[in-house]
Image (tube, rainbow, N blue to C red):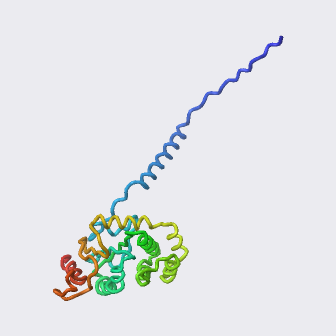
Amino acid sequence: MAKVQRKVVKKGRRQGLSTEQILMILGGTIMVVVVLAFLLWPKPKVVIAGDPQGLAMCGSVPCPTKGDPSAPVKMVEVSSFTCSHCRDYALTIEPKIDEQYIKAGKVYYIAHPLGFDSQAEQLAAAALCANDQGKYWEYSALLFQNFGRTDPTSLSSFAQQAGLDTQAFATCVNSGKHVKDASDASNSAMSVGVDATPSFFLNGKLAVRGAVPFSCKSGTPECSAGDFQSRIEEALKAGQ
């Protein structure tokens, strides 16, 4: 009877990771942790002189601005593209402020568009997409001039009229790039006391609420809530 011979297979000793491999794994892990911390860590509120509320930021991006950043008065406009008083202000009063104070280097102007409702949020996000191409003011003017036209075809047409790269604009809008920024902009405005649009801060002070004229005669009914000219002049004097 033949004997069955057993083959003995010797297992090789498992070798541990080399020091170089361990360092590479640790380095990769640390890099992942750093990237996650950067993405998830709350971003600090960006505050500039004359804007203690931090309304110069629209969510994660800087709000649209115009004028000289070193101007003595920082003016923040908090408005909505679905607000009729905001439309009236943009079409009749803002051009006067632009001509008399912004171009003269007296006012640095910051637009803080809101998205209180879904439609306003959509329009604010589209305007921020226009701002990515440096065309916020041209695009926002078209939104107010064509108040109520909020369909995608109109928004695309306004982009073309404003001189935007329409393909890049469409990509920005369709991806929802600035929807959260518009929503966060609304939350930040409400957190500092904004409960009506339009509202205006002058050097950090909530100075104007609602519809008021550019200028008016003190003591008259239309001047019951004041006017822009006197409020801006007061801010200029206070800053001297």
58 displayed left or right of 217: right
In this view of the protein, which residue sits in the foreground, 158 or 11?
A: 158
209 displayed left or right of 113: left
The extreme top residue here reads 1
Looking at the image, is 232 positioned above or below residue 26?
below
In this view of the protein, which residue sits in the foreground, 211 or 25?
A: 211
Looking at the image, is 62 positioned above or below residue 235?
above
Looking at the image, is 17 positioned above or below residue 157?
above
In this view of the protein, which residue sits in the foreground, 31 or 202?
A: 202
The extreme left residue here reads 219
Question: Where in the figure is residue 54, as x and y percent of width and height?
Answer: 31, 66
Residue shown at 22% from the left, 86% from the top? 222
Residue shown at 50% from the left, 47% from the top? 28
Residue shown at 34% from the left, 83% from the top? 88
Q: Quadrant of residue 2?
A: top right
Count numbered badges in the picture.
0
Q: Quadrant of residue 53?
A: bottom left
The extreme right residue here reads 1
In this view of the protein, which residue sits in the foreground, 234 or 225?
A: 225
Rendered-image quadrant of the N terminus: top right
Rendered-image quadrant of the C terminus: bottom left
Question: Where in the figure is residue 111, as x and y percent of width and height?
Answer: 35, 75
Question: Where in the figure is residue 144, as x and y percent of width and height?
Answer: 40, 81
Question: Where in the figure is residue 133, as x and y percent of width and height?
Answer: 47, 75
